[in-house]
Image (tube, rainbow, N blue to C red):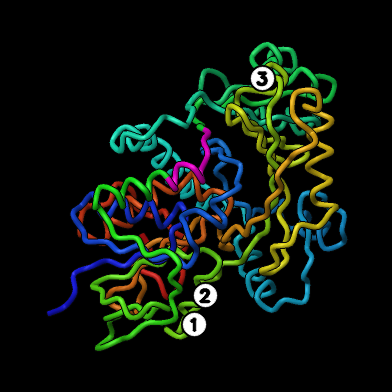
């Protein structure tokens, strides 16, 4: 008798929300994770913003000169540390194909729709699981230190919508915690549709709730080593603890996805774009902004978690390297000292680095794999994994169980993928 279980591989925010969405539909789910707990890699130290207002594809015409400057070491927010990397060159060629205005419009629309759908699910998810409310839904700011840059963005916003443009005085009046940045601000955008929360905490609480209520089985400290196939299907997931029979398999494995799929005959174009974060204990709540923000000029994101301030920055092409170079740490530390130095404990910050699984187009790979009858993928969300996680899990679960999906055409395209 064939096993009826769905095996979800990867217990980051994407895999955990996918497991939750499947369990809600009565599926028997086993979640497999090689680390000791949920959300221990890319989901651990990210900015925490559910940045619907920032959901746009990175591949655009303006990205081409930016990458050129990065190759010459003249783009502070983008670094290329491992130029001699065949995977980077393959990914980069595909990325350049998407750097047209028309491709950017299509890919950005896919990201925005999925991000909005996902963000709108968050409140209900917390209520359904009875979790302490640890997310805020009051919006986010996008700040500019360059006047021309601000005017360019503000001209696209208009009035009376979900995003409004604010001058420096209005910004400070709306968010007094930005007072120390007053002299540097040219203006900003207030997005009323964004949220913020601790992705790591939410994912771990969700995983614990799913396990404690018996919705799913979770196997931590279990590495996937391969697949047993028969008649075009995966019949078991091979692991360090032995085979796990299955009816369906979902890959939510981020940058490690190509490692698992190469033996199956394909390798998704997912490149690890390295990011950094620092977390400081807040000592004066009035001296830090309550709303999260993205500094569009220096390309950093800042979020207030109540007792902690999280700052994230840099898109670095460094392969699988997870080291913390001193100069990257200094960039974060200098920004915090300049902007909020009197309001946080400067002596005890915690620094982190993670690998954002990024597709050339921008949207994730989401859907059913061609050529393997029961294999699905939900990976490649880049810097928007937390933002898209609930929605991506929901859409995949709807497709897998035969429901009419709430959204269509939100996945990146690939020859090996029947995209959602």
Q: Which mark is residue 262?
A: 1
Disc 2 and disc 1 in contact, CB within 8 angstroms: yes
Placement of 258 over or under 309, stated as above or below: below
Disc 3 and disc 1 in contact, CB within 8 angstroms: no
State the extent of the magenta-drawn residues as a range.
196-204
Q: Quadrant of the C terminus?
A: bottom left
Placement of 233 over or under 256, stated as above or below: below
Gap between marks 2 and 3 measured at Cα: 44 Å
Q: Position of residue 88 (x, y in %)?
A: 68, 71
Rendered residue at 46%/70% (across/down): 414
**Residue at the extreme left:** 1
Mark 3, other Cα within 10 Å: few <14 / some 14–19 / many ≥20: some
Q: Position of residue 191 (x, y in %)?
A: 56, 27
Q: Which is nearer the eye, 212 or 236?
A: 212
Q: Which mark is residue 285?
A: 3
Going from N to C along the chain, the mark reached first, 2 or 3, is 2
Q: Which is nearer the eye, 21 or 68?
A: 21
Q: Position of residue 41 (x, y in %)?
A: 56, 57
Query: In the displayed structure, does residue 63 sit left or right of residue 382?
Result: right
Going from N to C along the chain, the mark reached first, 3 or 1, is 1
* Number of callouts: 3
Q: Which mark is residue 258?
A: 2
Find residue 85 and report its image quarter: bottom right
Query: In the displayed structure, does residue 352 sit left or right of residue 77?
Result: left
Gap between marks 3 and 1 measured at Cα: 49 Å
Find residue 53 and report its image quarter: top right
State whether the magenta stretch is mostly helix, strand or loop: helix
């Amino acid at each position: 008798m064939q096993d009826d279980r769905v095996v979800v591989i990867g217990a980051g925010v994407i895999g955990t929300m996918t497991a939750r969405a499947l369990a809600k539909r009565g599926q028997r789910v086993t979640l497999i994770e090689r680390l000791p707990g949920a959300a221990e890699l890319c989901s651990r130290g990210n900015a925490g913003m559910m940045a619907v207002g920032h959901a746009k594809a990175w591949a655009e015409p303006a990205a081409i000169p930016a990458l050129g400057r990065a190759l010459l070491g003249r783009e502070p927010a983008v670094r290329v540390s491992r130029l001699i990397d065949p995977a980077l060159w393959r990914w980069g060629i595909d990325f350049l194909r998407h750097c047209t205005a028309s491709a950017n419009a299509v890919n950005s629309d896919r990201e925005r729709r999925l991000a909005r759908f996902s963000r709108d699910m968050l409140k209900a998810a917390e209520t359904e699981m009875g979790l302490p409310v640890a997310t805020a839904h009051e919006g986010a700011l996008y700040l500019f230190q360059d006047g021309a840059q601000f005017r360019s963005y503000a001209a696209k916003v208009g009035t009376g919508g979900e995003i409004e443009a604010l001058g420096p005085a209005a910004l400070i009046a709306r968010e007094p915690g930005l007072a120390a940045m007053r002299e540097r601000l040219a203006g900003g955008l207030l997005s009323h549709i964004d949220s913020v929360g601790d992705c790591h905490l939410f994912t771990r609480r969700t995983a614990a709730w799913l396990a404690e209520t018996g919705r799913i089985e979770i196997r931590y400290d279990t590495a996937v080593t391969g697949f047993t196939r028969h008649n075009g299907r995966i019949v078991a997931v091979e692991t360090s603890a032995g085979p796990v029979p299955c009816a369906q398999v979902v890959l939510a494995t981020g940058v490690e996805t190509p490692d698992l799929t190469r033996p199956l005959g394909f390798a998704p174009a997912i490149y690890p774009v390295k990011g950094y974060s620092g977390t400081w204990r807040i000592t004066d709540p009035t001296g830090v902004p309550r709303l999260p923000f993205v500094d569009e000029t220096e390309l950093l994101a800042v979020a207030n978690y109540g007792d902690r301030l999280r700052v994230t920055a840099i898109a670095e092409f460094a392969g699988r390297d997870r080291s913390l170079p001193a100069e990257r740490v200094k960039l974060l530390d200098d920004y915090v000292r300049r902007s909020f130095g009197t309001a946080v404990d400067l002596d005890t910050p915690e620094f982190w680095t993670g690998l954002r699984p990024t597709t050339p187009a921008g949207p994730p790979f989401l859907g059913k794999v061609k050529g393997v009858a029961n294999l699905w993928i939900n990976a490649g969300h880049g810097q928007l994994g937390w933002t898209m996680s609930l929605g991506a899990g929901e859409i995949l679960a709807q497709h897998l169980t035969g429901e009419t999906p709430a959204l269509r055409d939100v996945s990146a395209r690939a020859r090996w993928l029947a995209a959602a």
